[in-house]
Amino acid sequence: MLNFDEAEPHVFEIVDAVVQELPTFVRAGSQILVIGAQARDIIHSALGHRSALRSTDDLDLAIVVSDWDHYLAIIEDRPAIGQNGIRFRIAGFPVDIMPFGGVEQPKGTVTPPPRVDGMNVFGFEAVRTQSAEVLMPSGDSVRIPQPAGYAALKLRAWLDRAPIGIMKDAGDIAVALYWYSESPEVSKRLYDSEDTTLLERYDWDPSRAAGALLGSDIATLLGAVDGTALAQAWGAGVDEQRLARELHLTGTEVRLDERLGVLAALQDGLSSSGFR
């Protein structure tokens, strides 16, 4: 699906500038996973799309660390921004540095100093494991999530943030659903087979079938334990009407009932990994 050689050069600029400012020991060994809006823009462009998305200079980096000394060495002397405890000014850009790996306690939760409240890093390791290593123009490399990995993190983010009135993740979920509905590879998986059960299940509606396939791919990528956990949390905690009202892309017009149908199919896929 992803062809980073065909991506527009400008989508790498912020990531490349920031990564060059990080310590050498971080830049080696595929420790840096780009998440958030910059990952979205890189994926969007690497899939061949040129439509404009919500613009931001913010960068979110998830970094594998072995212990808190490792993390503190990364953020040492970085000017802090705001009150969340993980945002710093690096190369002139606001950067959230989210540690995961050996500092998770319990699994899926970290509490980076000086924070006292835990942060959710659910799925980060699975997303990193399945991500693509991408060479930046400077020669440094980072990891970029697969579309399903990006979507997995956004579903979890919606569950965490929508209850406190933060709705921006809905637009990013809409982008991920768009990637699948417009993907030639997904179309091949749906049509180029003697088994068209998935399309038949959704009355030959390719948007709903693609949504189900995205849900299935998310569950498969996360693995049995985390995939089941997300499916259960999504089934119990998501307000589909609320999400559907926010689920739109600039320049597109999809009826509310159609959005609800795609979300129902997405949930089917989350609960039934292995459609394809």
Image (cartoon, rainbow, N blue to C red):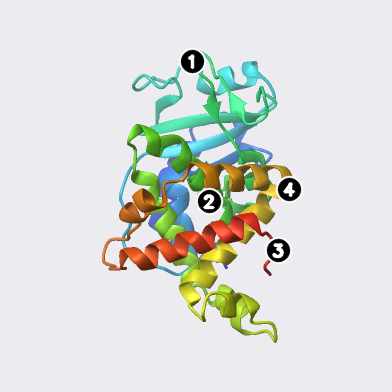
Q: CA distance from mark 3 to mark 4?
A: 11 Å
Q: Mark 3, residues whose alpha carbon is within 10 Å: few (<14), some, or many (≥20)?
A: few
- Name the mark on residue 224: 4
Q: Residue at x 43, y 48 (%)?
A: 38
> Going 55% across and 49% down the picture, which residue do you hit?
152
Name which of mark 1 and mark 2 comes first in the sequence: 1
Three-letter code for the amino acid on which mark 3 is drawn: Gly
How far is disc 3 from disc 1 in space, using C-alphas? 39 Å
The residue singled out by tag 1 in the image is 115
Above or below — where is 139 with respect to 89? below
Q: Disc 2 or disc 4, which is closer to the eye?
A: 4
Q: Which residue is mark 2?
A: 150
From the viewer's perspective, tell me whether residue 2 is left or right of residue 224. left
Picture quarter with the C terminus? bottom right
| In the rendered image, the vertical position of residue 166 relative to residue 84, given as above or below | below
Q: Position of residue 153 (x, y in %)?
A: 53, 45
- In the rendered image, residue 271, in percent from the top left (x then y), is placed at 63, 55
Say which residue appears at 70% left-offset and 26% top-offset. 102
Residue 174, above or below 14: below
> Closer to the N terminus: mark 2 or mark 4?
2
Residue designated by label 3: 274
Q: Amino acid at mark 4?
A: Ala
